[in-house]
Image (cartoon, rainbow, N blue to C red):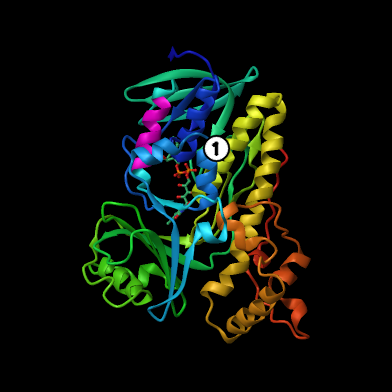
Amino acid sequence: MTMVPAIDIAIVGGGVAGTSLAIVLQRAGLSTAVIEREATFRDRVRGEACHPWGVQELHDLGLTPFINEIGGLELPNWTRYRDREVELEFAWSDAFPGAYPEIGFSHPALQEALWQGAADAGAQIYRPATATISHEYGAWTLQIHHAERDLGLKARFLVAADGKTSATRRVWNSRGITDPVHHWFGGMLAQGIDLPQDSSHQGYHDAGFSMLFPQGNDSWRVYYVGPDDPTQRFSGPERVQTFLAACEPCFPEGAFTSATVKGPLAFFPNAHVSASRIAGEMAVAIGDAAGAPDPSQGHGMSLLWRDVRVLRDLLLTEEWGSVPAIFAMKRREYETILRTHAAWVAPLTTETSPEAFALQSQVELAREDDPTALGYTAIFALGPDSQPTDDDARSRFFGEHKTENPVRIVTPLDKIVETVHDCHN
Ligand SMILES: Cc1cc2nc3c(=O)[nH]c(=O)nc-3n(C[C@H](O)[C@H](O)[C@H](O)COP(=O)(O)OP(=O)(O)OC[C@H]3O[C@@H](n4cnc5c(N)ncnc54)[C@H](O)[C@@H]3O)c2cc1C
């Protein structure tokens, strides 16, 4: 087997997480290789709107030019609808002066631009390729199955960036733990939607909501969150029309009159997936491989860029043997805030029972005392930043102290029976 030059860090997975990391590490003087399974990047219905806190992370990493290069569209406003009428028009800069706007973009175009960026920065890149990984004599050995021949590669440090169902993290006996699914999340690329393109749009239906994120060139990522089992309702030759028809009533009359399909439709269980172990010996997982957040909250891209920044900074300042444990601890902290918030808001945004309506009223009372909701109202603009997640915080978030007989709805977090471990092997 031909050996290629040894490197500092091997990254398995050439998604946005893996290539972003390769670029910033190369720029910092470390050598990397990225191994990607797919020959070309296609529309997998993935994150195409990044919240302001993720745009800040992107900026801090010096990666904003990649979004600009693919024509990413700034979305300075958020418009919310009820019964087809505008309920709220919100400018990020009014509520959070200095915060970046949200950005809409094509995910596969960004993957392609970052892949090229990693090559330009000097990373060894292999696609389509997979790797067989072993750890011997204090180094990682990767047998790269690339094109028609195998190559051998040695690296000091291993990063799993191969997504929610990561096979790489199994090398250190880590696996995904899925929180209880509380809804289904469907997405499709459409065109011809007649609404302002300087805003994200969110409208409610009886048992959930729909969201629209423009990304320029009359491309719109359309999302639908609902309880319906998609294999029943959204099946057969009319499934795309059924999907558009399900979203249409959430928005003003006429907005969907000329809407047509532009990409595949896919549905996903709406649940947070944690990695049982984020780190192994001289190895960590980042992005969805480290824990994929509930897609309905749209934090995945922001979270992966936070991972990239935190890991880069640790690799540049700490002794590498201690990096996995420190990274896992920090990652678990900010991930837990996102996971907790997503679980808490699930019954507020997607349940229609009398208890859910009573809970919503109780929460409104709590907001009179604390409009910041313990800092959680800033989570989309400023990110997870020390918001409390304990029982007392939960009680205050839901306004349980405001009434003698508080309403309490079991959230996905209450049903979790498995715990996650961060000790590494
Ligand atoms: C329906 C949906 C909507 C979403 N919407 C949003 C949103 O609006 N905003 C937002 O911020 N986030 C959103 N997300 C989340 C976001 O898409 C993810 O968090 C993000 O794509 C994770 O990137 P990643 O690089 O970690 O993983 P991935 O994008 O999964 O990339 C992993 C890469 O690894 C490769 N790979 C896998 N296995 C191997 C292997 N064995 N060997 C080599 N390569 C391998 C894959 O081909 C892929 O290229 C959404 C997610 C879903 C499912």
How many other residues sit within 10 Å of disc 1, few (<14), some (14-19) or many (≥20)? few
Classify 371 as above or below 388: below
Q: Quadrant of residue 121?
A: top left
Q: Residue at x 61, y 65 (%)?
A: 343
Residue found at x 54% / y 68%: 182
Q: Is disc 1 placed on a helix, strand or loop? A: helix
User: Which region is colored magenta?
Assistant: 109-119
Check the picture and name the quadrant holding the N terminus: top left
Camera-side residue: 317 or 377? 377
- The quarter of the image holding the C terminus is top right
Q: Nearer the viewer, residue 58 or 166?
A: 58
Does residue 308 lie above or below 191 as drawn?
A: above
Eyeballing the image, is 10 above or below 85?
above
For label 1, the residue is 60
Residue at 70% x, 26% y: name it.
318
Question: Toward the viewer: 199 or 300?
Answer: 199
Say whether residue 117 is magenta: yes
Majority secondary structure of magenta residues: helix
Percent across and percent down for residue 289 are 54, 43
Q: Answer whether residue 69 is visible to the viewer in this image.
A: yes
Task: Please give left or right for residue 77 compared with residue 177 in the image.
Answer: left
Q: Position of residue 162 (x, y in %)?
A: 48, 39
